[in-house]
Amino acid sequence: MLSSDFLNSLSEDHQRHRHDRALAGGGVVYRVATTHDDEVIGFASGGPSRYPNFAEQNELYAIYLLPAFQRRGIGRRLFGSVTAALAASGRKGLYLTALSVNPNKAFYAKLGGVETDAPSIQLGIETCSQTAFIWTDMSTITDLEV
């Protein structure tokens, strides 16, 4: 989905600092999925909205699951765990943005997200179009199996 130049510019150290900053923010929720052997296979994070473009007050910042573990309900449980914690914050609504070329966008639609346009994002020297998914009523997603 992204150029190899951009992906090669990312370092483990940069990503660690990025996640540390996210975790330091108030109201941030972070969940990690592991195997029985404690191998990390995925994560999801969310918190207060970072963008004024959306009326929803919660944002799913990221969700990722290794391809070998997809389509087993793990991503659904990660999503449900993060969104349940966000709903408990008292903030209303949820949105997320995904690259428009993301082949996994159907996952969000299947969970009831309403698809809409989102502002483009600059990643390195590339400008990438995005799609947003919105849940104005979080009660429709907080009862996912967690």
Image (cartoon, rainbow, N blue to C red):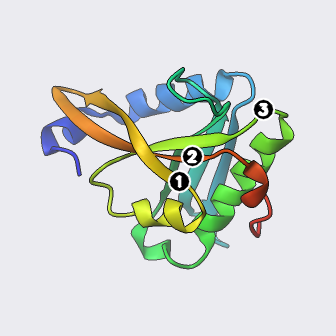
Classify mark 3: residues with Cα within 10 Å, few (<14), some (14-19) or many (20+). Answer: some
**Residue 107 appears in the picture as rendered:** yes
* Figure quadrant of the C terminus: bottom right
Q: Which mark is residue 114?
A: 1
Q: Residue furthest bottom?
A: 72
Instruction: Give the structural element (helix, strand or loop) at label 1.
Output: strand
- Please name the amino acid that badge 3 sits on: Arg
Classify mark 2: residues with Cα within 10 Å, few (<14), some (14-19) or many (20+). Answer: many
Relative height, residue 25 to residue 113 (above, below) = above
Residue ID for mark 3: 91
Q: Nearer the viewer, mark 3 or mark 2?
A: 2
Q: Which mark is residue 134?
A: 2
- Please name the amino acid that badge 1 sits on: Val
Instruction: Give the structural element (helix, strand or loop) at label 3.
Output: loop
Q: CA distance from mark 3 to mark 2?
A: 14 Å
Please say if the residues under marks 3 and 2 sit with CB atoms less than 8 Å apart.
no
Which of the 4 quarters of the picture holds residue 61? top right
Please say if the residues under marks 3 and 1 sit with CB atoms less than 8 Å apart.
no
Looking at the picture, tell me which residue is in the foreground, 38 or 88: 88
Which of the 4 quarters of the picture holds residue 86? top right
Q: Residue at x 16, y 26 (%)?
A: 125
* Residue 108: percent from left, percent from top: 52, 60
Q: Earlier in the sequence, mark 3 or mark 2?
A: 3
Q: CA distance from mark 2 to mark 1?
A: 5 Å
Q: Residue at x 44, y 66 (%)?
A: 106
